[in-house]
Image (cartoon, rainbow, N blue to C red):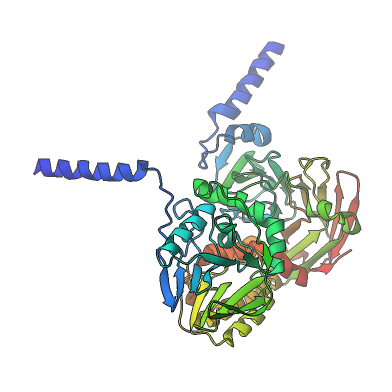
């Protein structure tokens, strides 16, 4: 008995220590998940950036067409982009023909280097934002996820998207030039399959982020998305959905956030006071609620203050 | 005699530093130096009656919001606020002469650091509280937006704000347009608001603030005054280290 206990303990120790000591192999374990005919998504974790997840917190996807593979967003690092390509090659031997980047946030485009030989297409505003902020984003991610980022540089898109319908290898893709989450958010609706790639205009059961957000613009955009004839919704973060519920939930949270910040500045709350506001129960099941709400205060509070502050001299 | 005095002085300073210094609950290697720089001469205790509220991650290293609340203590002479690992640690000194001992402000953080408030009561004891703020950093060495855009002069000294005055609350919140340059961004000398005074109609000093380089660009501050001053406007006067003066009236 004593021997068994000792052996179990020893075994546990070995397993535990190899777990700690072993260097990560920097494998994102990207598994393509089929969401419609010819259409696949890599679903990321609903977490913030960390060394443990290596930045795999985002949804990316691809559509296999007769004119090659269309990639939508390239992930958070060069390694992510490379591993995406490998994972795509397990589904099809068709070459990648082009890449669409939904917006300029680092988890959506820092894999671009892996696709540098094909057209990388984004809205003009996204290109401008990447040129202004891309390098800073990459530096920041090195700090947050470490060596997963090795070799990653911010590679800007090389082609500007025109809003409208484009036919690619039997798929009719509608590119929508929108904004709200950032100043340039592209959504892509595949009319052939009914799949809507919303980028970060939709976070599903994962609290939305606001570093470049314009809430009233975002709400207007959500009304546009709601009217689109999609069957499958691929959000930028969170689970793929087959209905419009995630859009309603976004509208609900953004409307609440706007009201809460308005109320806070009108009651004379400081930023730290506002960070302590009680968050409604209906949002509690959304991942990262408290930390994202606190970040949103930092991003947005000054603009709400300026609505109540009057010139005093 | 001189020697004796020296001995006494050495003994006093010794007892007031290394020996009596309580262990830092935040585990910062800078704590001894911070004590020596800002608190020397009085014993310090870590006291949960002092509250320092700050986010544990600085989403924007140039605007880290902090509230210091020492209202649970009486007879406060001054409150000193500093961040151990900032290149310029001292953020503000607050003298709540005839105001509530609560202050909200924002500051620039250069790297992950404890942020602390030490409250000196008239029995000669520092009551200390603090909190770690994690940060990607760089807040102190980046040029201010006003410098980058180049329009800071157009707005210098403008004050925007509001007063909340009812039976329970006598609060002002305000923003002063000022670049608050730390002197650590290349080619830009230190340029910051040094003093803010708050008075009532009778000319009584209600509170006095000394601000330092780490306070954020276009500082936003909140102060609470006693509700027995509800009837009077609050007059603020201030000056920066270049001699610019500004004033504002909170009705």
Residue A11 in which image quadrant: top left
Q: Residue at (53%, 46%) from the top-left corner?
A: A150
Q: Residue at (86%, 43%) from the top-left corner?
A: B241
Q: Position of residue A67 (x, y in %)?
A: 53, 72
B186 sits left or right of A14 in the view: right
Q: Position of residue A254 (x, y in %)?
A: 60, 76
Q: How many marks?
A: 0
Q: Residue at (45%, 71%) from the top-left corner?
A: A40
Reply above or below: A71 against A216: above
Q: Is residue B68 at all visible to an observer of this figure?
A: no
Please state which of residues B173 and A70 is positioned toward the viewer in this rendering. Answer: A70
Q: Is residue A86 at all visible to an observer of this figure?
A: yes
Of the 4 image quadrants, the one containing the C terminus of chain A is bottom right
Residue A112 in which image quadrant: bottom right
A13 sits left or right of B172 in the view: left
Q: Position of residue B175 (x, y in %)?
A: 79, 60
Q: Residue at (56%, 77%) from the top-left corner?
A: A250
Q: Position of residue A312 (x, y in %)?
A: 86, 65
């Amino acid at each position: 008995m004593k021997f068994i206990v000792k052996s179990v303990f020893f075994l546990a120790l070995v397993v535990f220590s190899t777990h700690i000591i072993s260097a990560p192999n920097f494998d994102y374990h990207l598994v393509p998940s089929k969401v419609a005919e010819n259409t696949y998504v890599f679903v990321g974790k609903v977490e913030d950036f960390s060394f443990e997840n290596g930045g795999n917190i985002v949804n990316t996807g691809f559509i296999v067409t007769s004119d090659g593979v269309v990639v939508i967003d390239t992930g958070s690092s060069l390694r992510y982009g490379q591993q995406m390509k490998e994972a795509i090659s397990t589904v099809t031997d068709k070459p990648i023909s082009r890449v669409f980047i939904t917006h300029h946030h680092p988890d959506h485009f820092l894999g671009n280097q892996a696709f540098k030989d094909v057209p990388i297409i984004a809205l003009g505003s996204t290109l401008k934002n990447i040129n202004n902020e891309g390098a800073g984003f990459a530096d920041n991610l090195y700090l947050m996820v470490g060596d997963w980022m090795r070799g990653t540089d911010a590679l800007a898109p090389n082609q500007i998207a025109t809003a409208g319908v484009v036919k690619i290898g039997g798929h009719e893709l509608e590119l929508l030039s929108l904004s709200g989450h950032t100043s340039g958010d592209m959504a892509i609706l595949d009319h052939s399959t009914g799949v809507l790639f919303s980028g970060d205009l939709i976070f599903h059961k994962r609290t939305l982020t606001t570093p470049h957000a314009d809430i009233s613009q975002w709400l207007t955009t959500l009304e546009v998305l709601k009217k689109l004839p999609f069957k499958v919704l691929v959000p930028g973060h969170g689970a793929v959905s087959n209905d419009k519920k995630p859009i309603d939930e976004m509208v609900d949270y953004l409307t609440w956030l706007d009201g809460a910040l308005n109320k806070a500045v009108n009651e004379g709350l400081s930023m730290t006071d506002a960070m302590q506001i009680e968050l409604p129960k209906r949002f509690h099941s959304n991942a990262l609620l408290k930390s994202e709400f606190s970040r949103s205060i930092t991003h947005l509070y000054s603009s709400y203050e300026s609505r109540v502050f009057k010139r005093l001299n | 005699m001189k020697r004796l005095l020296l001995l006494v002085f050495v003994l006093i300073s010794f007892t007031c530093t290394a020996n009596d210094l309580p262990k830092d609950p935040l585990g910062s290697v800078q704590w001894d130096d911070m004590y020596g720089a800002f608190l020397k001469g009085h014993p310090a205790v870590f006291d949960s009656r002092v509250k320092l509220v700050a986010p544990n991650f600085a989403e924007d290293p140039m605007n880290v919001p902090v509230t210091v609340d020492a209202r649970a203590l009486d007879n406060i002479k001054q409150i000193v606020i500093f961040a151990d690992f900032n290149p310029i640690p001292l953020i503000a000194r607050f003298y709540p002469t005839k105001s509530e001992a609560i202050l909200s402000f924002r500051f620039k953080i250069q790297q992950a650091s404890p942020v602390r408030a030490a409250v000196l009561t008239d029995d000669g004891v520092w009551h200390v509280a603090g909190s770690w703020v994690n940060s990607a950093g760089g807040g102190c060495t980046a040029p201010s937006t006003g410098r980058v855009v180049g329009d800071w002069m157009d707005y210098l000294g403008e004050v925007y704000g509001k007063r909340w005055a009812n039976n329970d609350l006598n609060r002002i919140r305000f923003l002063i347009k000022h670049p608050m340059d730390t002197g650590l961004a290349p080619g830009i000398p230190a340029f910051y608001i040094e003093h803010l005074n708050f008075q009532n109609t009778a000319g009584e000093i209600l509170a006095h603030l000394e601000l330092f380089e780490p306070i954020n660009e276009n500082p936003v501050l909140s102060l609470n005054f006693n509700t027995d001053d509800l009837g009077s406007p609050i007059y603020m006067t201030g000056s920066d280290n270049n001699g610019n003066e500004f004033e504002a009236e909170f009705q």
